[in-house]
């Protein structure tokens, strides 16, 4: 998760069968797709994974499965805090780490309530640190059920412990991103991965370790391409074109998500169901036609930047 290499960390989907069970065969194929696309790591058991609808045993099984399929090719991280007393969260962090993940991710909204202070969050995170010696940790500013964004000062302090190696940032503010990067720039074994593709190129140029966005659940190779070429002057026009594509299609990728992402991957040849456990909204004919058009626009973009898709067929 070092910031020395720009990379894409997928916020992984969880495939389900039509009966609602976790589809481990589909998860194997999906993991392989991310890897073939060039992902620098994998974030299993996150919001895109529908983590809040998975049981604790399913969360452990999904993380363990992804670790096994990745087989050391890239590091795997997974969420390990889901509310309740710090002692309970600590126990699950330890169990999750035993699956072989590189780091256990702390959801920033699960250690203190929406009305509670920054000091309350800091105190409980320090308790969790003390109770999980030797376990690398990370942060995820998950927007559900509410978003708790860390300050640059907080991030600097916790990264300074040597225990925090990963941060998935969802502040959506490039100035805050720059402040966090400045505050942590001296720590080699830490990476900030930005979720907001509107300022992806700016964030990469500012020093972020890479990107960790839902757009990669449609076309991971395009996010990898941007991480690889964001500062290539010879490809400046193509980089601007790709950045504009992400901006122009921001809304369509969030509406009825993750159902639409699973449908898009179906169109690309990945044999998974569009079943979701969460209420993602209505996937009707209007949404389907919009996604079909979006798929064609994606293919046209690949041709324009001469990028050969990886993993599944077009």
Image (cartoon, grey):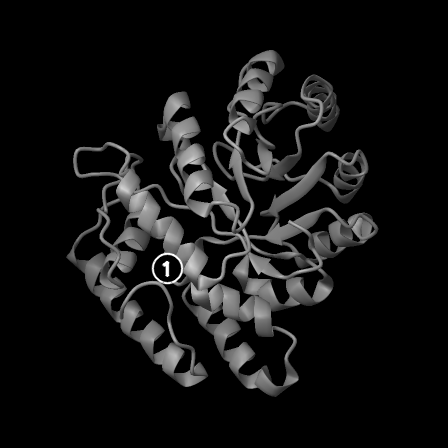
Q: Residue at the spot x=65%, y=43% of the render? A: 166
Q: Quadrant of residue 18?
A: top left
In this rendering, does residue 47 appear at all?
A: no
Q: Which of 35 and 168 lies nearest the eye of the viewer?
A: 35
Q: Residue at the spot x=37%, y=57% of the render? A: 33
Q: Position of residue 193 (x, y in %)?
A: 61, 52
Q: Quadrant of residue 295?
A: bottom left
From what the image shows, is residue 83 above or below residue 139? above
Q: Secondary structure at mark 1?
A: loop
Q: Position of residue 67 (x, y in %)?
A: 47, 39
**Which residue is label 1 attached to?**
218
In this rendering, does residue 230 appear at all?
A: yes
Q: Position of residue 29 (x, y in %)?
A: 32, 50
Q: Residue at the spot x=29%, y=52% of the render? A: 262
Q: Quadrant of residue 303?
A: bottom left
Q: Which of 21 and 83 lies nearest the eye of the viewer?
A: 21
Q: Position of residue 304 (x, y in %)?
A: 41, 84
| 153 on left or right of 225 | right
């Amino acid at each position: 998760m070092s910031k020395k290499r720009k990379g894409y960390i997928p916020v992984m989907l969880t495939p389900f069968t039509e009966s609602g069970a976790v589809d481990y065969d589909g998860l194997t194929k999906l993991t392989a797709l991310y890897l073939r696309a060039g992902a620098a790591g994998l974030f299993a058991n996150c919001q895109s994974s529908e983590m809040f609808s998975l049981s604790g045993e399913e969360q452990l099984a999904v993380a363990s499965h992804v670790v096994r399929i990745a087989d050391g090719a890239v590091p795997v991280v997974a969420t390990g805090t889901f509310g309740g007393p710090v002692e309970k969260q600590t126990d699950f962090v330890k169990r999750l780490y035993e699956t072989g993940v590189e780091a256990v991710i702390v959801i920033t909204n699960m250690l203190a309530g929406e009305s509670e202070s920054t000091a309350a969050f800091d105190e409980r995170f320090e308790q969790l640190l003390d109770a999980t010696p030797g376990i690398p940790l990370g942060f995820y500013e998950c927007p559900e059920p509410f978003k708790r964004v860390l300050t640059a000062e907080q991030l600097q302090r916790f990264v300074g412990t040597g225990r925090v190696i990963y941060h998935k940032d969802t502040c959506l503010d490039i100035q805050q991103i720059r402040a966090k990067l400045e505050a942590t720039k001296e720590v080699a074994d830490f990476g900030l991965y930005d979720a907001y593709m509107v300022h992806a190129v700016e964030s990469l140029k500012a020093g972020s370790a890479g990107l960790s966005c839902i757009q990669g659940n449609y076309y991971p190779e395009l996010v990898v391409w941007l991480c690889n070429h964001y500062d290539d002057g010879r490809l400046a026009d193509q980089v601007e074109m790709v950045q504009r594509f992400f901006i122009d299609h921001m809304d369509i990728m969030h509406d009825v998500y993750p159902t639409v992402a699973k449908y898009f991957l179906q169109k690309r040849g990945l044999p998974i169901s569009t079943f979701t456990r969460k209420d993602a909204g209505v996937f009707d004919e209007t949404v389907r036609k919009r996604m079909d058009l979006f798929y064609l626009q994606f293919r046209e973009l690949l041709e324009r930047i001469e990028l050969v898709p990886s993993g599944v067929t077009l």
